[in-house]
Image (tube, coloured by chain):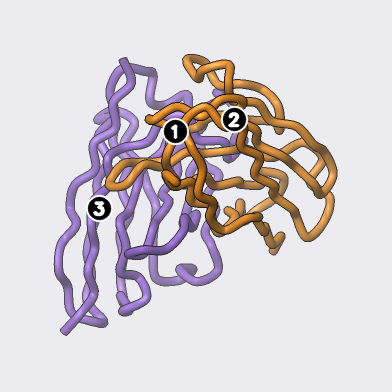
Chain colours: A orange, B purple
Amino acid sequence: DIQMTQSPSSLSTSVGDRVTITCRASQSISTDLNWFQQSPGKAPKLLIYAASTLQSGVPSRFSGSGSGTDFTLTISSLQPEDFATYYCQQSYTTPPTFGPGTKVEIK
Amino acid sequence: EVHLVESGGGLVNPGGSLRLSCTASGFTFSFYSMHWVRQAPGKGLEWVASMSGHSYIYYVDSVKGRFTIYRDNDKNSLFLQMNSLRAEDTAVYYCARDMATTVTTFRSDYWGQGTMVTVSS
């Protein structure tokens, strides 16, 4: 199975800050990488698929980049509703696997 | 508008069985692959099983031989029959739609609210 790692595991930040989360795959997954946001008690929400394509309805402050094994999710200016946990997921091969998550908290 | 509603969760003894249901609306159900993804309390996400519109089925190794995914396209419903349940199966189970038609991409664009399964004596 492809293992996904994320860093940092958590971060404390403020509204308006730029946030960068990284995700690494244990082998090359081309650009088959997706990002999800999950608020407490809620279902995950797809933000970005195919490494850099913004899902319909997702604000443009979210962006993704990367290919192969290393990927990045960037939030250009954090908003109050962005405090949540973020997961990367590879859809390159079965089983699809998720990273352990990055919790973005209010400083 | 796409809606996915799970049901069937609850408390079950180790070794017991449970059937989860997911009722879909707002899209042509038979065109899309569907997935079950679970999340143990305080933990991350784990993909469990997928089924294409009519045939292809995939399972994570830890549930093979115990869980069965199936669907009724006439009733816009997805199911997960869970047998021989273990404590480690305790989780919120989400139903999710694949974002593509005709192929399975394992990218899920719509999710239900989840149903809690607790395996404990």
| Amino acid, disc 1 | Asp
Q: Residues within 10 Å of mark 2 (few under 14, many from 20)?
A: some
Nearer to us of marks 1 and 3 is 1
Disc 1 on helix, strand or loop?
helix
Q: Residues within 10 Å of mark 1 (few under 14, many from 20)?
A: some
Determine the residue positioned at 67% across, 57% down.
A4
Q: Position of residue A31 (x, y in %)?
A: 77, 36
Which disc number belongs to residue A27?
A: none
Determine the residue positioned at 22% across, 69% down.
B118
Q: Quadrant of residue B92?
A: bottom left
* Left or right position of B50 against A76: left
The residue closer to the viewer here, A40 or A95, is A40
* Left or right position of A12 against B82: right
| Amino acid, disc 3 | Leu
Q: Position of residue B51 (x, y in %)?
A: 48, 44
Q: How far apart are the two marked residues, 1 and 2, measured between alpha carbons?
A: 9 Å
Q: Position of residue B41 (x, y in %)?
A: 32, 64
Q: Chain of mark 1?
A: A
Q: What residue is shown with label 1?
A: A82
Q: What residue is shown with label 2?
A: A75
The answer to whether any part of residue B53 appears in the image is: no
Q: In the image, are marks 1 and 2 on the same chain?
A: yes
Q: Chain of mark 3?
A: B
Determine the residue positioned at 66% across, 47% down.
A90
B1 above or below B52?
A: above
Q: What residue is shown with label 3?
A: B20
| Amino acid, disc 2 | Ile
B114 above or below A19?
A: below
